[in-house]
Image: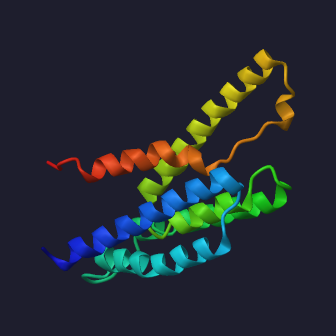
Amino acid sequence: MSILFFIFLLKTILFYSFFLFSILWDFRKRSLPKLLLLFYSLVGIPFFLFSLWQDFFQGPFQLSLPFLYSFYPFLFSFLLFLFAKCSKGALGCGDGLFLLCCAFYLNYKSFLFLFLSGLICSALVSMLLFLFSIKMKKNWKNMSFPFIPCFIPAGVYFFVLLFTPRA
């Protein structure tokens, strides 16, 4: 087995451990510990740099759109974090930091899929909570749920893709 396989395996194990810890912590505390985010961000930087090196710096370097696309998840996560700061608690800062940390481990296509599936799942959960509040005659404005567990469908999909043979 090659060294690339072991690097990919380590990156996958680290991403899923971060994913699992974040979901569990967000369910229980509705926040993410700074040490968890710091640890997985610092560990993720070499993996991100390695993927850049592997994809773009093996031959002569050209500034191309795919190279710039690889930085979009960071820009998007940073803008989401700024939006969370301005929204006065409507969106937690931990959600933006979670996505920022995920950007170290995922390419831009996977990151976009992760975010969009999280939005779709949160929309479904919001509709169900709204219908539940109407049925139970509760004030729906006081109901909330954590956003990070809405990424579970995308995480399961990525996990299934790991074991799907490629043609």
> In the rendered view, would you say 153 is above or below 23?
above
* The residue positioned farthest toward the top in the image shown: 135
Which residue shows up at 42% across the image and 75% down it?
48
Name the image quarter holding residue 56: bottom left
Is 156 displayed left or right of 4 in the figure?
Answer: right
* The residue positioned farthest toward the front in the image shown: 28
Residue 135 seen anywhere in this rendered image of the structure: yes
Which residue shows up at 66% across the image and 64% down it?
32
Camera-nearest residue between 68 and 45? 45
Which residue shows up at 43% across the image and 60% down it?
16
Quadrant of the drawing holding the N terminus: bottom left
> In the rendered view, would you say 144 is above or below 12?
above
Name the image quarter holding residue 131: top right
Q: Could you tell me residue 124's position as x and y percent?
A: 61, 31
Name the image quarter holding residue 23: bottom right
Q: How is the image coloured?
A: rainbow
Q: Could you tell me residue 5's position as x and y percent?
A: 21, 71
Q: Could you tell me residue 151's position as x and y percent?
A: 53, 47
> In the rendered view, would you say 2 is above or below 112?
below
Q: Could you tell me residue 68's position as x and y percent?
A: 47, 69
Is 4 displayed left or right of 94 in the figure?
Answer: left
Residue 62 seen anywhere in this rendered image of the structure: no
Camera-nearest residue between 111 and 151? 151
Is 55 displayed left or right of 88 in the figure?
Answer: left
Which residue shows up at 76% across the image and 16% down it?
135
